[in-house]
Image (spheres, rainbow, N blue to C red):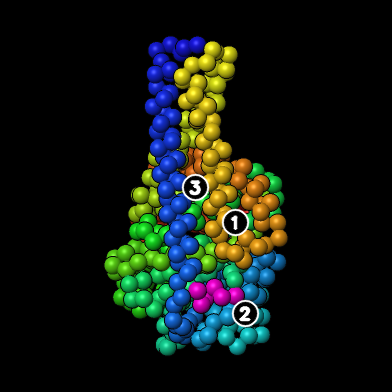
Amino acid sequence: MQFPGFNHNAIIPYLIAIAYFFLIVEICLVMHSFLYARRERKIKRPRYAPKAVIIAPHYGWDAQTEESVKILLSQDYAGEHEVFFVTNAVGGSDYDSSYSHLGRLAQEHSHVRALLAPNVIDNSLPRSQKVQNLITAISELPDDVEIIAFVDADVTVREDWLRLLVEPLQDPRIGATVGARFYYPHTLNLPSLVEAIWVNFQIGVQGDHRFTMVWGGSNAIRRELISDADVLRRWENATIEDHNLTHAVRDSKLKVHFVPECVVITHTANRTWRQVLEFTNRQMIMTYRMGFPAQWGLSLVGLLPKALIVFASILLLPFYINWPFKFNQVFVLLALLIPFIEIHIYRIFSRNLPKVLRDMDGFRDNIRMTSFATPISMFVAGLNAVYTVFQDKIIWGGVRYRILSATACQVLGRVPDATAEAEDNH
């Protein structure tokens, strides 16, 4: 069967070749990260434990947050360290639901402080709430602090997380150390599985190359970077802090160093497609609008065409299945192999995650079930990249922002309660 004016027999081999080219690029990136992680784990560094502060911005509170905080407060770190929890005020006398819990922890632990940042909406501040929270915490740092570590409220760290992030910073060529986030879905809900793959596969391309970026949920810097790279000025009108830290490190001719053992866990439950698309679109919009075209382009050029070719092959399959064996049938079948290859790439990548994670009860079964969502997740990432070209607004923590540049945003105001409830707290 032929479509009028379209000779699919002639073009199919070239399309499949393009799909496999990008698949090979993907495999090379994953293997590069795989080998880097193996080398990095073998390195034994001298003891290095200067005074550090962990800054943990909070938004909301639940049972998982409480459990994660308990682990954060029991860090096995040889040097002196403090934990600054920070959340935001709401109106003149109210505050985020996390503040009372954080205040209780500050009373129970001598090395803990609970800080309350001004609300960006109520005070007409030109930056995101998370950035404001971090600026508030940094303004309270003791003079003798040498290391600042940042961690998100919704992640679970290991007890040696701080030590592992800090030790590489004794190398003056390293400007920031960074971990990564691993989503662990406790459900077979398809949107949740797709979101987990979307997040987790990014670990597979982290390494010692220049495309490694600072992620705000698990990273550490020397305090001097704040002044030397003018970080507070970069944050003054910014939407997000970690992309600006990445620019600060690169502008200082330093490296972002990935620490493979500092992969932190976010436990997830049932998610809706709306929540997943809001989250993934937001992440891609921030990447594109804040000056990381290579990372955005990899999703657009490397993932979307490959997914479209696979789906097109599925649609064309009925026109081939009853034919006598022909050469082009081989190409269609090769296209249909791509989803299975992607699934196995994800399973192989998971073998390089930290051992403490791989030893968790049910981990292998979780990876096996989640991996089947890999082809859909790759397609979603490609669609995110397309959507980003036409959108510069995001919703984050119940507030709408317009991203103007890496260092500038416009705070558009709170979203209606219904939208805020649907919005995730990542």
Disc 2 crowd rating (10 Å Cα; few below 14, some 14-19, many 20+) is few
How far apart marks 3 and 2 lie (CA) works out to: 35 Å
In this view of the protein, which residue sits in the foreground, 170 or 250? Answer: 170
Q: Mark 3 points at which residue?
A: 281
As rendered, which of 194 and 384 lies closer to the eye?
194
- x, y percentage for residue 49? 47, 83
Instruction: Point out residue 355 in the picture as x, y percentages from the top left corner.
Output: 60, 64
Whole-percent x, y for residue 275 in the image: 59, 48
Secondary structure beneath dot 2 equals loop
Is residue 124 at all visible to an observer of this figure? no
Dot 1 and dot 3 residues touching (CB under 8 Å): no
x 45%, y 52%: residue? 31
- Residue type at mark 3: give it: Asn
Type of amino acid at the residue the image marks with label 2: Ser
Does the magenta run of residues contain 364? no
Name above or below for residue 325 compared with residue 84: above
How far apart, in angstroms, are the residues tagged by discs 2 and 1? Answer: 22 Å
**Which label is found at residue 74?**
2
Q: Residues within 10 Å of mark 3 (few under 14, many from 20)?
A: many
- Up-down relation of residue 381 to residue 249 (above or below): above
> Is residue 163 inside the magenta stretch?
yes
**Residue in the picture at 70% in, 66% down:** 63
Task: Give the residues drawn in magenta, as a range.
Answer: 159-164
How many marks overall? 3
State which quarter of the image contains the C terminus.
bottom right
For numbered disc 3, what is the local secondary structure? Answer: helix
Dot 1 falls on a residue whose secondary structure is: strand
Q: Residues within 10 Å of mark 1 (few under 14, many from 20)?
A: some
Q: Mark 1 points at which residue?
A: 183
